[in-house]
Image: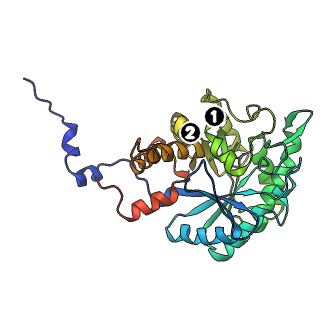
């Protein structure tokens, strides 16, 4: 009977030994928390397909961010729901737009918390697309100027970083130029570089009321079957001046995250999107899996794949869990 010389189980015997050789950490420092701002006062509207998340008016949002900052979460990603939609998404770049108001209020109350704004048109356009629509198609170049205006208006309101998610070609360059000309050369860009046309955005589109009114987003978001193309998208965004690049969604694209980290070695974010959150929450509620363990395993997997930053609706749950010492072992 031959005995194995190397026994990987030796290092799995004791919790502290496991901890000693653990390769990946998931810390509160790695997380960003997305929030949805709406007009009004005292509004806290639960989002049915994202249990635990709500649309918040600015006064409520301010309470929430104090909590978020107190937990040690470094920043939030802000989305807004406008009062009115129109074909050009005007409220997206209005000085008193909902995101602009929210940024000012948050910066007023918790100036150190990083406020990152999603830069896109889809919540603001009547047709629900991320760019200008002409003749039934989403036009690239005429959209760039508007996207740059959105980014500049966010920077003017005090955003620490802007995050374009529209997937128009050349938008990072257009935003960089716009920011530089407006005197915001120091404002970084976190580009949603490899953003796939994903079914996992479903709950978000309920939350943000941003579903396209005709067609879908496949003419601008990436084909889920493509990995090499994601590297090309990232390279383009870096050339145009992106400071942080992103892969989105996260769980079905761990290979893309891993490749991006290996090929570029730049700060990399992964967005664990609404559908990933909803799946774990729903199965947890049904008692079909252990929600806390599934949450930590999924987010740790995203870190192990190579993401430096994880954007997740679970950020507060993770922070609370880590605060009480994690799950042990
Ligand atoms: C806006 C945007 C979307 C998400 C982030 N920014 C939706 C979309 O592209 O349809 C999705 C986030 C999530 O599902 O959690 N373009």
Which of pointers 1 and 2 lies earlier in the amino acid sequence?
Answer: 1
Q: Does the numbered disc 1 mark a residue whose Cβ is under 8 Å from ligand 1? A: no
Q: Secondary structure at mark 2?
A: helix
Label drawn at residue 260: 2
Q: At x 89% / y 33%, what residue is drawn?
A: 136
Q: Name the residue tied to disc 1.
A: 230
Lateral position of residue 161 relative to residue 175, left or right: left
In which quarter of the view is residue 234 placed? Answer: top right
Q: 122 above or below 136?
A: below
Q: Residue at x 59, y 56 (%)?
A: 53
In this view, the residue farthest toward the left is 1
Q: Position of residue 137 (x, y in %)?
A: 86, 33
Residue at 43 percent across and 53 percent down: it is 26
Q: Nearer the viewer, residue 238 or 10?
A: 10
Please tell me whether residue 188 is drawn above or below residue 191 in the rendered image. below
**Residue depicted at 83% across the width and 48% down the height:** 125
Mark 1 to mark 2 CA distance (whole Å): 8 Å
């Amino acid at each position: 009977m031959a005995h194995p010389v190397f026994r990987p189980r030796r290092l799995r015997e004791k919790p502290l030994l496991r901890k000693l050789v653990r390769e990946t950490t998931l810390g509160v420092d790695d997380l960003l928390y997305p929030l949805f701002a709406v007009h009004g006062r005292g509004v806290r509207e639960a989002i049915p397909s994202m249990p635990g998340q709500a649309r918040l008016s600015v006064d409520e949002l301010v309470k929430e961010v104090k909590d978020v900052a107190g937990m040690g979460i470094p920043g939030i990603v802000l989305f807004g729901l406008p009062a009115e939609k129109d074909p050009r998404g005007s409220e997206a770049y209005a000085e008193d737009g909902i995101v602009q108001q929210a940024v000012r209020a948050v910066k007023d109350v918790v100036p150190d918390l990083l406020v990152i704004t999603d830069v896109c048109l889809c919540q603001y356009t009547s047709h629900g697309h991320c760019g200008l629509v002409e003749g039934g198609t989403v036009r690239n170049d005429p959209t760039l100027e508007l996207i740059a205006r959105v980014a500049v208006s966010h920077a003017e309101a005090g955003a620490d970083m802007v995050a374009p998610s529209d997937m128009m070609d050349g938008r990072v360059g257009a935003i960089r130029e716009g920011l530089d000309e407006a005197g915001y050369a120091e404002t970084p860009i976190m580009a949603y570089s490899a953003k796939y046309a994903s079914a996992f955005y479903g709950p978000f589109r309920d939350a943000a009321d941003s579903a396209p009114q005709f067609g879908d987003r496949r003419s601008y978001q990436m084909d889920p079957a493509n990995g090499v193309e994601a590297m090309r998208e990232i390279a383009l965004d870096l050339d145009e001046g992106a400071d942080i690049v992103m892969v989105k969604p996260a769980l079905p694209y761990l290979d893309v995250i891993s490749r991006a980290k290996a090929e570029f070695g730049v700060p990399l974010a992964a967005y664990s999107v609404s559908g990933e959150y909803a799946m774990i929450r729903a199965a947890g509620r049904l008692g079909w899996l252990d929600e806390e363990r599934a949450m930590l395993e999924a987010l740790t997997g995203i870190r192990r794949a190579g993401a430096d930053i994880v954007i997740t609706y679970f950020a507060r749950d993770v922070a609370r869990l880590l605060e009480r010492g994690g799950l042990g072992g």
